[in-house]
Amino acid sequence: MFANPLMDGLQFAKEPAPFVITIFGATGDLTRKKLVPALFSLFLKGNASQFKVVGFARRPWTKESFQAEALSMLSGGHYAHIPEGQKKAFLEKLDYVSSTFDDPAGYARLAELVKPWEGKLFYLSTPPDDYPTIIDNLGKVGLNKTDRGWVRVIVEKPFGRDLATAKELNEVLSTQFEENQIYRIDHYLGKETVQNILVLRFGNGIFEPLWNSRYIDNIQITVAESIGVGTRGNYYEKSGTLRDMVQNHIFQLMTLLLMEPPNDLSPDTVRTEKVKVLKSLRPITYKDIKKYTVRGQYAAGVTQGQPVRGYLEEDGVAKDSKTETFVALQVHVDTWRWEGVPIFIRTGKGLGRKVSEVAVTFKQPPLQVFRNQATDGGQNQLVLHIQPEEGFTFHINAKIPGYTTQVRPVNMDFAYGDAFGEATPEAYERLILDALVGDSTLYTRRDEIEASWTFITRILQGWALDTGPLPQYRAGSAGPEEAKALTASIDQKWRKL
Amino acid sequence: MTTYADPVAIEQQLRKTQQEVSPNEARTNLFNLVVYVDGHDDAKLTDALNFLHGKRPARVIIVRRNAGGETRADATARCVTDKDDKVLCIQEILISSGDDKAGEAPETWTPLLIREIPVFVWWLASLDKAPLPQLFDDIADRVFVDSSLASDPLAFLESLASRLPGLKTPVTDFAWSRSAPLLKLTAHAFNAADRRPFLAEIASVTFEGGKTADVVLYFQWLKTKLDWTGTQAPTGRAWALKDEGGKPVTILHKNPAPLEKGFLVTFQTRSGVELKLSDSRQGFAVAEGSGLEKYTSVFRYQDTGEALLTEVDRNASDRLFLELLSHWS
C-alpha cells in the first residue's frame, strides 16, 4: 500500500511546507504596509507556521533592528489587540542581511541563511532597475535552483515600460529561473471581487449562455481615483495611467470577463484562456489613436470636498509634462464570441469619486413591445462593484403599479458587506500564500505580459506622434469632455461616477 | 381562535426592532436556522449564536420544548456594525412550546421561515427518540445534530446509519465536524513516503481521551478508509477487527473525557513500530514514535460556533461522513 487512503475526502487549508522568504528591498514601503502584515496574518491564521523571513537591503540594519521595525509595522489599529506573545513568536522568525544588491558577500551570507530550508521564495520589492543585478547574483550563488524542495521568485510591477523592456526583463529572469518559478504579481488579482468574476461567470448557469455578442451590447470598465498623484509625482511622470493601470490591473479584469470557459482551474489552463483574449485585441494603430483613445490631465478643482491642484502643479511633475492622468479606450476583441461588442475602459486620477466597477449592458429585446415607453436607461445592466463596496447590481425593468403599463428600471442588489461579516483577506496574503503552495493562477505569465504590452505599446507609439495639447479636465469631474465621444459612437453614455 | 406565532405580528415586531437598530440598512439574510432546545437556556446555543453574530445575517427560530404553560412566541433582533458601517443582524424568534407541545410542530414555525433561502434545523434537544430527520424532510435543507449529546452515541449513530438509504434530508453531525483536525493530523502523520507502508501493518490502535462519539467516529473512519472489517463493540470494550489481508486489528477506547482536554492515540504495527499522536495543549500536536522523525503540526479544536459557521456556508453534506455511515456495521 503506497498511497495514503487516509487523505481521501479530507479538506485541507492551503498550508505550505516549511519555507524561507527573502525580501529584497525590505526597508521599503511595500514591506512595511503589505508584506510583513500579510506574513504575520498568515502566521496568525495557521497557514504558515514553519518559516523564516529574511530582509535584504542596503540600509545598515541588523536582525534586531529589522525585528524592531517589524514590530512597529504591527503596532496600533487592530494589532493592538493581538497578544504580544504571538508578535514575539513571529518576530523571532525574522532575520536581516545588510548588503548592496551587487555585493557577492551579501549573497554568500544569504545563501548560508536560507540553505536549510526546503522552500525558498525570493520577493523582488525593489526598483526594476535592480532586478537584473539581483537575479544574476542569485544565480551565481546557486539560489536559483535546488536539489530538494523548490525555489520561486515574485516580481513586483512595473514589469517593463513597453514591449521591449518587458521582453528584456523576461530574458533576464529566464537566464536564471524557469518560467514555472517566476511569479509576476499584480495585487489586483488578489482581490476577492476580481476572483469572484470567475465564480459569477462559471459557477452560475444563467450568465454564460448570455455572455456573448448576441446578448451583450457593450461593456464598461471603470477604475476611478478621486485623489491626485500626491507625493508620487516623480513615479507617475515615468509611467502615466496607461502603464500604471491599464496594462496590468484593468487588463486582468478584462481578460477574466472575456475569456472562454476554462476546462479546469489549473494555473496554465486559466492563463492560456486569458492570453487568448489579449492576443485577440484589435490593435489600435496611430491612425486610429484619436478614434479609440482619449487621454487627459487633471487641472485644479475640487475632489471629495477639498481643493486639489492641477497635475502640472504637483511636486515632481514637469511643467510641460505630457503624462496622462486619465485614459479612456474603446477596444474590440476579435473573437467569435465578442465580435461587435465594444469594451469601454476608463481610468484616471482626480476624478469625482473612487469607483472600480464593470458594467455589462445587455441588448434590448428583439421586439420592443413596450416601445412607447421611454427607453433611456432601460437596457438590462449587470454591474459588478469592486470598490468601494463589493457586490452586484442587476438593473431590470418592472411595471409601475397602475392602470397603464408604465415601465421603469429597478435594481436587484447584492452587497458582500450585507451578507458576509468577516474581513476579506488582504490581496497580498492570498497571493503570497498561493506562491508558497505553488499555485500561479493569480500570477501573470510571460506570454500574458508580452501580449498586453504588444497592445499597449502601439498606443504609446501613437501618442508619441501626437504633438497636440493634452485635454484637461477639472479635478473632481468625470474626465475630459473628449471621452464622451467614445461611448457616443454607439449611442451610449459613460456611467455616472 | 388560538394563534401561537402570528407571522404578521412577528414580522412587524422584527421590522420595528431592526428599524431602531439600523434605520437605513437593506435586509439580507443568508439562511434560516431552526434550533430545538429543551426547557432551559442552552449555553451551547448561546455560544454558537454569539460566534455567528456579525459574521452571517440569519433568521434564527428557537423552539424551546417543554417550556410549560401556553405556547407563545416572541421576536427580537440583534445587530452589529462592522468597520465599514455595515450592519449585520441576527433575527431571533423564540417559540416557547407549552404543555400542548404545539410549538414543536413544524407547522407552527414554517410560516415564519424566509422563503428562497436555505433552512437548517439544528436538533440541540435530547436525541433519544428524536424524530430525526424525517420530520423535517419537506422543510429542511439539512439537519444538524451532535451525536456526542446522545445518551448512547453508538446506538444513535447505528440508528442513523441504518436509516441512511431512506434519508431525504442530509444530516450533519457536529461531533464529526469537531473531529476534522484529528483526522487531518492522523492522515498527515502517516503521509511521509516511508510511513505509508505502516498503514497496512497496524495491529492495534488505542485512543485515550475523547468522548464516545468522537472516538467511535474516528475508529469508523480508520475502518472505512483502511478496509478493515468487523463490528463495533459496546462502549469501553475492544473492537476485534480484521484488516484487508485478514490479519487481526484491535482497537480500544480508554479514559473517556472531552477531546479538548487532550488525547493520546497509539498505533502499534506488527513489525513493532509504535506511533503516538498527542495534543501538546499549546496549539500544536505531535506525532512521534520509535525511530521516527518527530512531526509537529498546528492543532486547534473547532468549537460548536465555528462548526456551525462552516456548515451553514457549505452547500452539501460531508461526503466522507456519508461514506462512514454507509459502511457502518
Image (cartoon, rainbow, N blue to C red):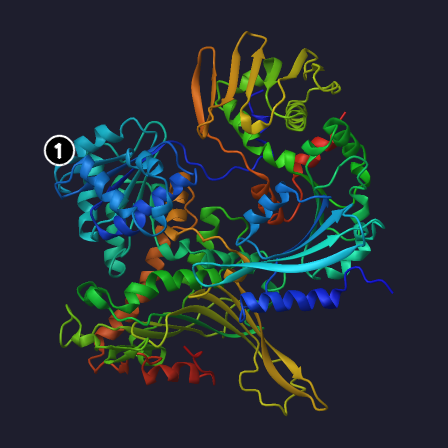
Quadrant holding the N terminus of chain A: top right
Quadrant holding the C terminus of chain A: bottom left
Mark 1 crowd level (few <14, some 14–19, many ≥20, 10 Å Cα): few
For the question of whether residue A475 can be seen, the reply is no
Quick check: A179 left or right of A192?
Answer: left
x and y percentages locating residue A345 in the rendered image: 39, 72
Image quadrant in which you'd find residue A363: bottom right
x and y percentages locating residue A88 in the rendered image: 30, 35
Q: Amino acid at mark 1?
A: Ala
- Residue for point 71% across, 64% down: B10
Q: Badge 1 sits on which subunit?
A: A
> A212 or B130, which lies in front?
B130
> A87 or A152, which lies in front?
A87
- Residue for point 54% across, 65% down: B21
Label 1 belongs to which residue?
Answer: A105
Considering the numbered disc 1 on the image, is that residue within a helix, a strand or a loop? helix
How many circles with numbers are drawn on the protein? Answer: 1
- Residue for point 33% across, 57% down: A450
Quick check: B4 left or right of A316?
Answer: right
Q: Is residue A490 above or below residue A206?
A: below
x and y percentages locating residue A228 in the rendered image: 26, 71
Outermost residue, right side: B1
Outermost residue, front side: B69
For the question of whether residue A108 can be seen, the reply is yes
x and y percentages locating residue A249 in the rendered image: 36, 61
